[in-house]
Image (tube, helix red, strand yellow):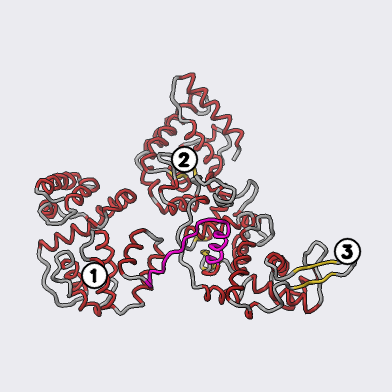
Amino acid sequence: MSIEWVNGAIEDFRAWGRSNGVVVDADEVRLLCDYASDYLDVAELADFSPVTFEQLLLDIYPRKVIAPPESAAETVAAARTLVDFLLDSGEIGTKMAGRMRVKIDEIAPAMPAALADTTKFGMAKSMFGAMGADALEADTPYAAKDDLAAAPRRPASVGGHEDCDCPGCAPLPPVRLAPPQEVAQAVREAGLLHDAHRVVAWMLDGGHTPTRKGRLRARDAARITRDLGVDAPALAWELALAVGLAEASWGPGGPGGMVTAPRGPGPLPARGDDEVLDLWAGTVAFLTGASEANVTGFVPVDRELYGVHDLLYRLQEPVAVVALREYLDEVSAEGDDPEAGGLEAALGVLAGCGTLEYEHDAVTLTPHGRWGLREVYSRMGLVAPVAADPAEADAETLIALLMEGVPAGQAERDISAWLARRPPEEAAREILAAARGTAAGTRGVAVTLVDRLGPEAAPAVREVLDEPELRPHALIWLASHGLTAPALTPEEALWAGVDALAFVLPRETDDSGEIADDLAVNLAPSAQAIEEMWQVDHPDVAEVLDLLGRHLPDRNLAKAARKAAFKARSRGIH
């Protein structure tokens, strides 16, 4: 980005506003100019065109800027003011200004949906979403790249600010950890720590010594690669020194040196679990703290070793390589070019070190990488909570964890693991017991879980046919599996419909656009159902009708829903 021309343009823009009595949003216009310069090769104000505004407001803003959909009006207003300034300052002519205004008028109604479209989110913006709304100041649109550029490199409790709102300083999420014995075994089998042990043994057995600066001699590195098949012998040797596997000493003024093994010369597989885990925590600390080291040979990654690992730890989901490249582009120093190649090779090196898994164009932490990184955080003094394993918990705990919100992939793994450890009938019985007497949200999660079970669960499902809140769902389940069951009465069908809609009530604040889309496609009840719905004896019927009144795309149906909500409240149903 050419900061000079943007700074000059904003100063001229402010002056124009003052001289013309126009209230200008200089910050929003600066953001437009910044992004136009960064991503659209706009080098001066005269380079703006109608296509520039279309790309900025419908493509780049949705990918880069943290802002609620309702803020689109402010951005569009700033764009219109910018066009007025461009015309008055002589940067564009009258015809061009007219074309720009037409294009902005076309963009205005589409921009809120573009801002809400999660498929457009870039890596940095997605990370903010994963942190939750609390990571943003109220009513303040953030340019995600500016905040992430400084955030992931230093945790708040290690020289940062405890009240910082950037993602790298946000509280760490609870994570699932593999059992310590599994972590120790994975570390023993391969990886950088494994290579470090082999390099130390080679140095000791052959009486080899490093340089006076402690580095591995070039000829020794070549021999180690040839003899042991270690791809990064110099890095393995640096790790050995860092975690105390080896120590090099030189006599005063003498030519000879000596390598010793303070932790003992034993190979890694022979060490006990506790020692292996301690060494592995040191390995992860070495890798993530090596900000100036040549770990991968790819500068953008080597400068962001902590940031990359921290990002994956917080997201807890595989991240596409293309998205990681975008993240590095957003946080890398000027002059670095993650697009120039080398990212895939760098990820391969980290996978060889043992902290990352890299396959199918996506990257995530290994189970032992996650364990080691959490240990590093704990040693830094950060609060690094551990999530309970829901597969070992009861159904009530599983449902509660799912309702708290976990990444979709993790939720799928949790559900599959929980169901796999129980026979279908037992699982259904426990889930339905946890749903008795609960709110619609809890009941909805429980019903969704039971829906995954096959006909073997039928005896447990039939046991709830005498329970009014569960009977409609049980009848639907039995019918969907082709099993004999009483017919669903119209009243029960209506009750089940209200209950299903009540399930989405807690999502309304965060997912209003998605709810409206669902209603438009497949959830909208008929006019007759809305007319009858207010009479249903369901505790959430009034709120459900209010929801329909706010989000049904058909205005007549929405109006009918609002009237029905009034009737429900008048009848005393709340």
Q: Amino acid at mark 1?
A: Ala
Q: How far, Cα to Cα, is label 3 from label 2? A: 71 Å
Provide the residue span drawn in magenta: 369-392
Mark 2, secondary structure of its residue: helix
Q: Amino acid at mark 2?
A: Val
Residue 371 counted in the magenta span: yes
Q: Position of residue 267 (x, y in %)?
A: 67, 79
**Residue 120 seen in this snapshot:** no
Which secondary structure lies at badge 1?
helix
Q: For this view, does 101 lie left or right of residue 429?
A: right
Gap between marks 2 and 1, in whole Å?
A: 58 Å
Q: Which is nearer the N-term, disc 2 or disc 1?
A: 2
Q: Quadrant of the N terminus?
A: top right
Of labels 2 and 1, the one closer to you? 1
Q: Would you name the residue on which mark 1 appears? A: 433
> Which residue lies under the disc numbered 2?
51
